[in-house]
Structure formats: structure tokens, C-alpha cells
């Protein structure tokens, strides 16, 4: 309709303030020339539409060059007058278009136009002077002369007859077939924004919007962004999102949801219910996204004009509230701030919006076609080019489930299908037929309420079945198509419903942006085959191939085969991701930093020059015709293909496919935001790395690469996990080596060299390796200052502690998988980290893998400080990083667990942990200490009997105990005690003999005590056992008193020092023997009992020390304040404080209410409650929910 104008104009943020800056400074840069060109085009078009300018005038004005600098003071004054008059003219024209009538008095128009024409005369004179300076050509001088004549002519006409403007305007607007008042008003307002909008007004308040727009504008200049084909010739593509039982849409309120569905109430994440810490999810989202909440309320006013935006809160959407019928809008807003399927669907459906925009631009509506027919044609074209399939695998089962959460998952899918009619859902359905139970792959869609071509019965279901495909079932085992890992098999059964030529694999926690969707057809062009020269689609496009009437089919076939042999098929194309979960707090930023570096600088280098980039998951786009004929998009062998993405990329690389990576397009990606979920994810990928290390694909790739590509392949694949494992082994063995030097009194000999080695090791082990690529990419994209501020923020919030702890998670998982094959899929959930994880769960997750190592390092460091043999050595410089690592492994699970340092929670957690240790089942883990310990040791003990080469595991355990035996031997060498004046028994002065005798006494005494206790307990003779126990205690105390006091004159040496050394050495021997027995004689009941008692004692000691530490920090109070403000923000900390006050007032029955906008408290039972097992179902008494071992 705006004939002569481009359909897409420059965005406001691009030109805001630029015109004013040119007027004020008098200088014009390249970007401002673009803005001035846009403004001149709009003004000329406007002048032509209102009849003020003719075609000759428009040609002259648009051909005139810009004068970059001010010529003189008079020129500067004319420019300012030009700007002021232009603003006035725009206001006058805007009033005229709003009234839709030409004013009767045109003197104001004439006066303003006269000033503008005078200023244009000044510009013509300035061009002439610029020509004399040698900055313009003769052709520019000729144009300036013509422009001067045209302006003078227009000035004479306006001065002679000002009222003639009224006749010109009326005739132009009445006879124009391409413009009217409405269209004029749109252009006038664009010109007004270009003149008056400031940078502050045009800059979006949201940092997310700024980032998206900045990346889009910058990417338009990317050298790899070529001109795309027309929409008719672009590849069709499908988006495929696998889904199991992850959250789809946040429910409004769990209690009301259960009532509506007619099911039993169950605790699940909703928007209005509050946690034990009196924080609702909506409260958290409002605190983390305040600007977006304001924007949401403004959008709601467009739907309900009568609402008061300032008073609108989430409670208005609750049942009985005035906005209850619009609750879906609130649920979508909240879900799009989390990592739910609703966010992914909303983002991916922007591909459809982008295609509609492009279709309307490339194929404008013909005058003879109605709007309805044109819309149907657009819909049909878009449906040919794009489709979206989500695969909720258990949708059919959830639809009939009696579990409120599972039923809500199915209901949420239905809501999305109705909201997005072009969306399809594929799931597995089970049915009983005359031939027995069978399985179907079913595809469903939602009915489009705007499609008037078909009749819809209001009583009919809004979701209908589109396809049903029967699948094979093993009638002996009852297994269907899900034979391997669930996620890849889910993709494999649903890919038949993705009909596009390209398939984009999208995870269920991703997002899309409209501006990036416009570049999708550019990315699809990258799937074309590549050759050493230019790629040509048809054989006759090649100058060397002459296709004519005389060309035989054999010659043409030879030419085509030659070109095919020279071409390399593109298997898939990857592109970068933006991690939007960094806005969820410090933990989100840490996880996002790692993923950001890997998704940009690391993959860029792996693609070129290394050429070893594989498929690292979503959002890569597959060439469907290539991949479906060469192994598919997912490798799905159970347990082996945990990281099915990497195996898929390796599979297509080995089959001759090329993998590309482009950076001119991106999409959103969510990462884990909770401490346990982040570590769970790292546990999963490290286990997958262990399976990758022993796979055939890894060997095949390695044997086919040159040395340099092999090194890059190692670093980008299994090398990362091996390096993490070896780094922690180095820390472990290095500190024991230092202690061995100290026992041997040899530290001073090696002090200088050891300190230099340790300084290098300390830098590497402190997590700095994870920050180096991140800092490099930040510096490339954001500059030095932004990089420094970002890194400073990360370090201050504990990123180094996080990365050190994460590295131990990776190392322990990789080591366990390589030894026992313990890798498995971990469902992390990726929820918001706003609730406290119970201490029992923290203990079960990290005790054996992290806390044990932390306390062992502290024990070794303390021993080293006591034994220190070198008075001139600086032990601080030698061991400071190991101290930091030890405290990190102990403190990190507490620091990154919100509300940990709350005194009330400390008390509840302590009681719950004691009950758990005593054998009560904890509802958060579904286990007690005994069942958890059994699961922890089942791999080491080979309880299932499926460990291959178990003798090798025992051998490596024996090797790992060597430091303990060495410490015992070295400690025994420091015994310096002997009997005075006893030449005939000088042999007793041998320190090793003394140690052997003392150890023998300890062993015999311990064995006798254990045997007597067992005997008396079997006969229930508790009295005899108590008498023996007290007698033994008195004898030992008397022995120490006599030996240290009365017998001191009969021996030389430090008796107390000797006793401590003997006890220390025996403790190391006990630890070593305990570890060996745990694996070697695991099926002997007495040995198993001994091992279990040892672990119980250590767990009890570790737990008590942890609670002492937590209680001290909670009593101080400062760590709690720092934790809330550093991990989240001040708004969330204030919200949590309000929640505490509201809870205290409620418990005190004061009758106070929560602050305005807060929700009613719905507390859930604590693990410390008397009815500890209420509200959950014990899954198993022999298999824990523990995930990290």
C-alpha cells in the first residue's frame, strides 16, 4: 500500500538521536549517512504524495550528495533552522492527518516550507564550496546547481500564492490511488521519531531485548550471511523436540488443579503456592524479571481496558479473581521465564511467523485477490515449508493417569496444541488387539478455531488424531520400540512425522527469536553439498559441460557422477546458542558461562581449522535425506549411548558427511539453575564420556585422523574428562608426596623445585581453566572493560569454588564409569533454585565423592603442618590451594544451597539427618542410611555380579591404598624411643620393631574385644560386657599414666609423640585395609559388616562436623545475608525477608498479612516432621534415589 517505500524500515534504536547529533556536531559518519538517506527517502515520498514535489524535484533531491562537515557558521545556523522547521512541519502534517482534513489557513505551512527550502539552498551553496575544496566531483556540482534552481523556483511559488498549497494537498489526497490519511500518518510518525527520538527512549529497558537486537543487527554484516533463495525455493524444514515427563506449563495453584481434575492432591511446582521459605514461584519471577512483569501488565490492559495496572497482581488470576479467565496468559508468561516446553514451543513457532512475514514481502497481495483467499494461500505456503513436532512419549498413559502431575502434563500438551494449531504431538500408545498387546506411534493436532474452511462441533474434542502407525512388539519380552535410551528412541519413533527436507533437533528447554527466524533459510542453504570449487545445482550450469541436443545420456551421466564424486554431502549444520538461564542467579551464570564458551569459541576452533566438530546436541539442523539413509539422527544403545549426540556426529563423519558451524544465527538455550541439577548434568555427561572412551566410534575416528586433528579430537572429546580426573589425582598424590617428604625429613632438599611445581599446579586446579575460553570470547564480543566486570562479578559470587567442585564431580563420575560402568541418564529438571535442598539429600549426593575427599585433604594438611620438618620452608605457599580446595569441597554444597544458614532449618535438618542415620526412611530421598550405603557399595562389591574383570578393579583399589601404607611406614620410621642402660636388648631400639610390637598388641586387643562382645551379645550377657568394657578402659588409662609418668626414667625419647605416631600409622593401615576388604571379600558377611561399620562411623563423624560448621555460620548471620544477595539479588532477598516476617506473624497469631501482592502461605511437610513418610511412596528399600555413584 505504501507504494514506493521499502516494506521494512530501519529500527528506531538504530536512528534514535542520530539526526540531532548531526545538527549539533556538524559531522556525519557512515551510519548517520544511512539514517539521513532513510530520512530523505521518506521525506521525498511524503512530498510526492501530498503533491508538493514532482518527479523532477524528487530525482534532484535524492541525487544530491551529503556534505559531511559544516562549511561555515552560517551553514551551521541553517542546519539548525532546517531541523526546527522540519519538526514543526511534521507536527502540522500529523494534525492534518488526524483530522483527515486540509486546514483552511495554510500560512503556517507556507512559513515552515519557506524556511526548509531556504535551508536546502544553503546546502546547495555548501556543496559548491565543498567542490572548491576538492571533496566533490563535477557531477555533484552540477546536481547542486540544479537543486539550487529547483529550491528557488519552489520558494517563488510559495511566496506568490501561499493558499495554493491547500489546493495542491486536496487534489493529491483525493486523486491518489496509493495513499490516504492513514498511510500518511504512519510515515509521518516514523519521520517524527527519526527527528525527536532520543537514545534513552529508543533503547529497550530489557537487557535481553538489547542483546537480541544487537546480535541481529551485527549479524547482518557477517561475511558468511549470503543472499538467500526465494521462499519458493528454500528447503522445507521440521523441528523435532523430544519430551518424556518434563514440565510443560506451570499450573496456577496445585490444590485447585487437583480439585478441577477430580484427583488426589499432590505437591507439585505451581505459581501461587509458597515454599517452606515463604517464597512463591511468582514472587521469585517478579523479583528476577521486574521490567518484564510491568510489560506483561501493560499487555493485559490491551485485553481488559478497565483493569488498574498498578494494582494488578498474580492473585487476581487465582480462582474467583477478576482475571481468572485470562489465567492462561499468566501461566504462559511464567512458563516462558522458566525452562518448560511452553517456552520452547512459543519460540519455535516464531519460524512460522517469520515465514509469514517473508511470504507477504515476496508475494504481495494482488489487487484481484480477497484478503481471505490471500491468507489461505499464505497458510498453505507456510505449511509446505515448516512444521513442528513435539514428542511427549508418555502422553497416552498420562491422559488416563490418576496422578495429578501426570494428568496435568497431558492437559498442558492439549492447551498448547489448541493455542498453536500448526503444532503436532507424537506419542507412544499401547493397545490390546486380537493378536495381543501392541504399540502405536500416534500423531495428534489441535483444531484451528480461525479455520473457517471446515466446520467444528463445539462439543467435539479440540485435539484430534492425525496419524496412527503400528509398531513392532516383541511378544516374548513385551518390549516395544523403546529398547535403548529413552530420549533417542523417542526421537527415532517420531521422526516419521517430520516431513521436511531438513530436521532441526530442539531440546525442550530452548527458545527462539523472530529476528533470528528470519535468517533460517540462510542456514538451510548451508546444507547444500560442498565442492572444492563453486557448487552448481545443475550439470548444465558448468561451463565445462555442454548439454545440448547431441549430448548422450551416457555423457550426461558421466558428468553428473563426476560432480557427485567431487562433492561432499553436508550432514548437519550447527550454530551458536545464547544461555538465557544466566538471569536466574549466580548458579545460572556459572553454568551459562561454561556453555557459552563451548558453544562459541570452542566449536569455532573445532570446526576450523581442526575439522573435528561433532554433533553436540540441539539446535543442530540435519540434512534429513542424508542422515536417515546413514544411521539416523540418534544412536540409542542402552547405557552406551548416554551422549547420543556425539555418537551421531561421529557416525555421519565416518560416513563421509560434513559438519558445519555458523555464527550469524543463534537461538536461546536453558541450562541447569540449581546446584544439584548442574552437578547431575555433569555427572551424566562425564559418565557418557567414559562410555565414549571405550566405544568403537572413538577408536575408528582416532585411527583415521592426522596427528594435529587427533590432538584436537582428544581435547574436545574424552580428553576433557581424563584431564579433570588426572588433575584431581595430581592434587591428591601431590599432597601425600609432600607429607612423605616431611616424614622423611627431606622437604628442605626439594623445597625450591617443589614450590615452583606447586605454584603452576595451583593456578591450574583453581578452576581458572574453565574461565580462560570464556574470558577470550567475552573480550572478542564485549571488550576489555565488560570482560573485566563480568569476571569480577563471577569470582565475587564464588565461580572458582563452583568450578573446582564441578571438576571433582566430573572426575569422580568418569572414574566410576571407567571402573564399573556406572554411567546413566540423570533427569535434572532444570527448575528454579529457590528452595532449600534438605541436608540428607546433600549428604547422599556428595558425601562419598566430595566430602570424604575434602576432609581427607584437611586431615593430611593438618598432619603436614604438625610434622613440618623444614623450618625455612613456606608451607603457606606450598599448600594454600589445597587448603582452598578442601574447604571448597566442604563449603560449596552449603553455600550454593539457598537458605542453608537459617537457624530453624539447621535444627530441622539435624533432627532429620539423625533419624536418617538411625534407619528412618527420608521422604526426599526414599532411603535410609543402610539402603543408601548398600547402593553406594554395590558396584565396588559387585553385588550384581556384572563387573567385567573385577580383579582389575581390586588391583587398582589396592594401588590406590599405597599412600596409606607409605604414610604408615614413613611414620614408623620417625619413632625415636629406647630403653636406657640395656645393651643386651638393643634390638628393641629398632623403631620398626617397636611399631610392630605395638601394632600387634592393638590388633590382639581389638580382636579379643570384638570376640568377647560377640560372644556375650549372643548370650544376651550385657552385664559381663559392661564389666569388661569398663575394666578395659581403666587399664588403658592406667597404662598411659604409668608409661608417661612413672616409667619415663627407664627410656629415652618422647613417649607421647611415639604413641601418636603409632596410632596415626595404625589408622592409615586400618583405612587401607578397610578399602581393600570392601572389594576383595565383599561376599563374606563378617567383612561386609566390618566395612559397613567403618563407613557408618566416618559418615557420622563427617555429618557432625558439617552441622557444627553450619550452626556456627548460621549463628553469625553474615553468611546468610551474603548468600542471598550474591547468589540472587536484593529484590529476592527482600522478598524472602518479607516471607519470614509474614510467617512469624502468622505463627504468633498477630493477624498480620503478607506484603501487597504476596500469596498465601502453603507450607509442605519437612523431613524432620514426626510423620516422616507422609506424602510419598517408598520406591525401594534396597535401591536409593542417589544419582552420583
Image (cartoon, rainbow, N blue to C red):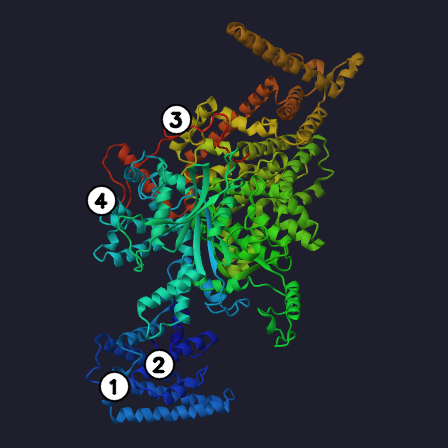
| Lower position in the chain sequence, tag 3 or tag 4 | 4
Q: Secondary structure at mark 3?
A: loop
Residue 747 place in picture, x, y as percent: 71, 36
Name which quarter of the figure residue 993 lies in.
top right
Structural distance between the alpha carbons of marks 3 and 1: 86 Å
Q: In the rendering, which numbered label is found on residue 171? A: 1
Q: In the rendering, which numbered label is found on residue 45? A: 2
Residue 1150 or residue 1184, whichever sits in front: 1184
Mark 3 and mark 1 residues within 8 Å of each other at the beta carbon: no
Residue 20 or residue 444, whichever sits in front: 444
Residue 667 place in picture, x, y as percent: 47, 57
Residue 81 place in picture, x, y as percent: 33, 82
Q: In the rendering, which numbered label is found on residue 320? A: 4
| Crowding near the residue tagged with mark 1, few <14, some 14–19, many ≥20 C-alpha atoms within 10 Å | few
| Lower position in the chain sequence, tag 4 or tag 2 | 2
| Crowding near the residue tagged with mark 3, few <14, some 14–19, many ≥20 C-alpha atoms within 10 Å | some
Location of residue 408 with respect to 121 vertically, above or below: above
| Lower position in the chain sequence, tag 3 or tag 1 | 1
Amino acid at each position: 500500500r505504501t507504494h514506493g517505500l521499502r516494506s521494512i524500515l530501519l529500527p528506531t534504536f538504530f536512528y534514535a538521536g542520530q539526526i540531532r547529533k548531526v545538527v549539533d556536531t556538524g559531522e556525519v559518519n557512515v551510519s548517520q549517512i544511512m539514517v539521513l538517506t532513510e530520512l530523505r527517502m521518506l521525506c521525498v515520498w511524503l512530498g510526492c504524495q501530498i503533491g508538493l514535489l514532482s518527479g523532477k524535484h524528487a530525482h534532484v533531491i535524492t541525487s544530491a550528495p551529503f556534505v559531511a562537515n559544516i562549511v561555515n557558521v552560517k551553514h551551521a545556523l541553517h542546519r539548525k533552522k532546517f531541523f526546527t522547521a522540519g519538526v514543526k512541519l511534521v507536527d502540522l502534517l500529523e494534525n492534518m492527518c488526524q483530522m483527515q482534513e486540509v486546514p483552511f489557513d495554510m500560512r503556517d505551512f507556507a512559513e515552515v516550507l519557506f524556511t526548509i527550502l531556504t535551508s536546502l539552498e544553503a546546502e546547495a551553496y555548501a556543496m559548491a564550496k565543498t567542490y572548491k575544496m576538492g571533496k566533490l566531483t563535477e557531477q555533484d556540482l552540477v546536481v547542486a546547481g540544479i537543486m539550487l534552481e529547483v529550491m528557488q523556483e519552489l520558494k517563488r511559488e510559495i511566496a506568490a500564492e501561499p493558499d495554493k498549497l491547500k489546493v495542491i494537498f486536496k487534489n493529491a489526497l483525493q486523486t491518489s490511488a496509493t495513499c490516504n490519511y492513514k498511510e500518511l500518518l504512519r510515515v509521518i510518525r516514523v519521520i517524527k521519531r527519526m527527528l525527536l527520538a532520543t537514545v534513552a527512549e529508543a533503547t529497550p529497558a530489557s537487557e535481553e531485548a538489547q542483546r537480541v537486537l544487537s546480535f541481529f543487527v551485527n549479524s547482518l554484516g557477517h561475511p558468511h550471511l549470503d543472499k538467500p533463495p526465494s521462499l519458493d525455493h528454500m528447503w522445507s524444514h521440521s523441528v523435532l523436540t523430544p519430551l518424556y515427563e518434563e514440565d510443560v506449563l506451570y499450573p496456577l495453584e496445585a490444590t485447585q488443579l487437583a480439585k478441577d481434575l477430580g484427583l488426589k492432591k499432590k505437591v507439585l511446582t505451581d505459581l501461587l503456592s509458597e515454599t517452606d521459605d515463604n517464597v512463591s514461584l511468582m514472587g521469585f519471577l517478579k523479583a528476577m524479571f521486574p521490567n518484564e512483569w510491568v510489560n506483561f501488565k501493560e499487555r493485559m490492559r490491551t485485553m481488559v481496558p478497565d483493569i488498574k495496572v498498578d494494582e494488578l497482581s498474580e492473585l487476581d488470576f487465582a480462582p474467583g479473581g477478576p482475571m481468572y479467565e485470562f489465567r492462561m496468559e499468566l501461566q504462559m508468561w511464567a512458563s516462558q521465564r522458566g525452562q518448560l516446553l511452553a517456552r520452547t514451543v512459543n519460540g519455535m513457532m516464531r519460524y512460522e511467523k517469520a515465514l509469514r512475514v517473508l511470504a507477504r514481502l515476496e508475494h504481495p497481495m494482488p489487487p484481484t485477490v480477497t484478503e481471505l483467499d490471500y491468507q489461505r494461500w499464505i497458510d498453505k505456503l507456510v505449511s509446505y515449508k515448516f512444521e513442528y513436532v513435539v514428542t511427549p512419549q508418555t502422553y497416552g498413559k498420562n491422559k488416563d493417569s490418576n496422578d495429578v502431575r501426570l494428568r496435568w502434563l497431558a492437559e498442558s500438551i492439549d492447551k498448547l496444541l489448541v493455542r498453536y494449531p500448526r503444532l503436532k504431538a507424537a506419542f507412544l500408545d499401547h493397545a490390546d488387539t486380537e493378536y495381543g498387546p501392541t504399540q502405536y506411534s500416534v500423531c495428534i493436532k489441535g483444531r484451528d478455531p480461525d479455520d473457517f474452511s471446515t466446520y467444528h462441533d463445539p462439543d467435539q474434542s479440540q485435539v484430534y488424531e492425525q496419524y496412527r502407525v503400528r509398531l513392532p512388539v516383541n511378544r516374548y519380552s513385551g518390549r516395544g520400540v523403546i529398547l535403548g535410551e529413552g530420549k533417542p528412541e523417542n526421537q527415532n519413533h517420531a521422526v516419521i512425522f517430520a516431513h521436511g527436507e531438513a530436521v532441526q533437533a530442539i531440546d525442550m528447554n530452548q527458545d527462539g527469536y523472530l529476528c533470528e527466524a528470519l535468517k533460517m533459510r540462510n542456514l538451510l542453504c548451508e546444507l547444500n553439498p560442498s565442492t572444492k570449487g563453486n557448487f552448481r545445482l545443475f550439470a548444465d550450469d558448468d561451463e565445462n559441460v555442454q548439454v545440448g541436443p547431441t549430448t548422450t545420456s551416457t555423457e550426461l551421466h558421466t558428468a553428473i557422477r563426476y560432480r557427485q564424486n567431487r562433492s561432499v554431502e553436508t550432514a548437519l549444520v550447527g550454530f551458536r546458542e545464547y544461555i538465557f538461564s544466566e538471569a536466574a542467579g549466580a548458579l545460572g551464570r556459572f553454568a551459562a558461562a561454561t556453555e557459552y564458551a563451548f558453544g562459541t569459541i570452542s566449536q569455532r576452533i573445532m570446526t576450523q581449522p581442526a575439522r573435528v566438530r561433532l554433533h553436540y546436541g540441539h539446535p543442530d539442523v540435519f540434512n534429513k535425506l542424508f542422515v536417515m539413509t546413514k544411521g539416523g539422527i540418534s544412536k540409542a544403545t542402552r547405557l552406551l549411548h548416554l551422549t547420543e549426540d556425539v555418537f551421531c556426529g561421529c557416525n555421519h563423519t565416518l560416513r563421509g558427511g560434513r559438519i558445519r558451524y555458523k555464527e550469524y544465527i543463534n537461538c536461546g538455550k536453558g541450562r541447569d539453575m540449581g546446584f544439584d541439577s548442574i552437578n547431575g548434568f555433569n555427572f551424566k555427561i562425564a559418565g557418557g564420556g567414559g562410555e565414549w572412551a571405550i566405544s568403537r566410534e572413538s577408536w575408528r575416528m582416532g585411527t583415521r585422523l592426522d596427528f594435529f586433528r587427533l590432538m584436537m579430537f582428544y581435547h574436545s572429546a574424552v580428553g576433557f574428562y581424563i584431564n579433570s580426573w588426572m588433575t584431581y589425582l595430581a592434587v591428591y598424590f601431590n599432597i601425600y608426596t609432600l607429607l612423605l617428604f616431611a616424614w622423611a625429613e627431606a622437604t628442605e632438599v626439594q623445597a625450591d623445585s617443589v614450590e615452583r611445581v606447586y605454584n603452576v599446579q595451583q593456578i591450574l586446579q583453581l578452576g581458572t581453566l574453565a574461565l580462560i575460553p570464556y574470558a577470550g570470547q567475552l573480550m572478542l564480543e564485549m571488550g576489555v572493560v565488560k570482560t573485566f566486570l563480568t569476571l569480577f562479578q563471577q569470582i565475587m559470587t564464588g565461580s572458582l569454588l563452583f568450578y573446582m567442585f564441578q571438576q571433582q564431580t566430573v572426575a569422580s563420575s568418569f572414574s566410576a564409569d571407567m571402573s564399573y560402568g556406572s554411567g546413566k541418564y540423570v533427569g535434572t529438571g532444570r527448575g528454579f533454585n529457590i528452595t532449600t535442598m534438605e541436608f540428607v539429600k546433600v549428604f547422599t549426593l556428595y558425601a562419598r565423592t566430595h566430602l570424604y575427599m575434602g576432609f581427607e585433604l584437611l586431615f593430611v594438611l593438618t598432619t603436614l603442618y604438625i610434622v613440618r620438618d623444614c623450618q625455612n620452608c613456606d608451607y603457606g605457599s606450598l599448600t594454600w590451594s589445597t587448603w582452598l580446595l578442601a574447604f571448597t569441597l566442604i563449603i560449596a554444597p552449603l553455600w550454593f544451597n539457598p537458605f542453608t544458614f537459617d537457624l530453624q532449618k539447621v535444627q530441622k535438618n539435624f533432627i532429620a539427618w539423625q533419624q536418617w542415620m538411625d534407619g528412618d526412611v527420608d521422604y526426599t530421598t526414599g532411603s535410609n542410611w543402610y539402603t543408601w550405603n548398600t547402593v553406594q557399595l554395590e558396584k565396588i562389591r559387585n553385588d550384581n555380579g556384572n563387573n567385567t574383570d573385577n580383579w582389575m578393579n581390586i588391583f587398582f583399589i589396592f594401588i590406590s591404598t599405597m599412600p596409606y601404607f607409605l604414610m604408615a611406614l614413613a611414620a614408623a620410621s620417625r619413632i625415636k624411643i629406647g630403653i636406657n642402660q640395656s645393651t643386651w636388648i638393643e634390638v628393641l631400639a629398632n623403631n620398626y620393631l617397636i611399631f610392630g610390637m605395638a601394632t600387634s598388641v592393638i590388633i590382639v586387643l581389638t580382636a579379643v574385644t570384638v570376640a568377647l562382645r560377640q560372644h556375650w551379645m549372643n548370650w544376651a550377657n550385657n552385664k559381663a560386657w559392661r564389666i569388661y568394657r569398663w575394666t578395659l578402659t581403666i587399664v588403658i588409662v592406667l597404662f598411659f599414666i604409668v608409661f608417661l609418668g612413672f616409667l619415663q626414667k627407664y627410656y629415652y625419647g618422647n613417649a607421647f609423640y611415639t604413641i601418636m605416631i603409632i596410632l596415626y600409622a595404625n589408622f592409615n593401615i586400618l583405612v587401607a585395609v578397610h578399602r581393600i576388604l570392601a572389594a576383595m571379600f565383599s561376599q563374606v558377611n563378617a567383612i561386609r559388616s566390618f566395612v559397613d561399620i567403618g563407613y557408618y562411623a566416618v559418615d557420622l563423624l563427617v555429618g557432625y562436623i558439617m552441622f557444627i560448621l553450619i550452626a556456627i555460620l548460621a549463628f553469625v548471620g553474615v553468611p546468610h545475608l551474603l548468600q542471598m544477595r550474591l547468589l540472587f539479588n536484593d529484590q529476592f532477598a527482600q522478598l524472602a525477608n518479607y516471607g519470614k516476617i509474614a510467617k512469624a506473624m502468622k505463627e504468633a497469631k498477630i493477624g498480620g498479612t503478607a506484603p501487597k501482592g504476596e500469596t498465601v502461605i502453603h507450607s509442605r511437610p519437612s523431613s524432620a516432621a514426626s510423620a516422616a513418610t507422609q506424602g510419598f511412596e517408598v520406591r525401594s528399600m534396597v535401591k536409593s534415589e542417589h544419582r552420583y555413584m
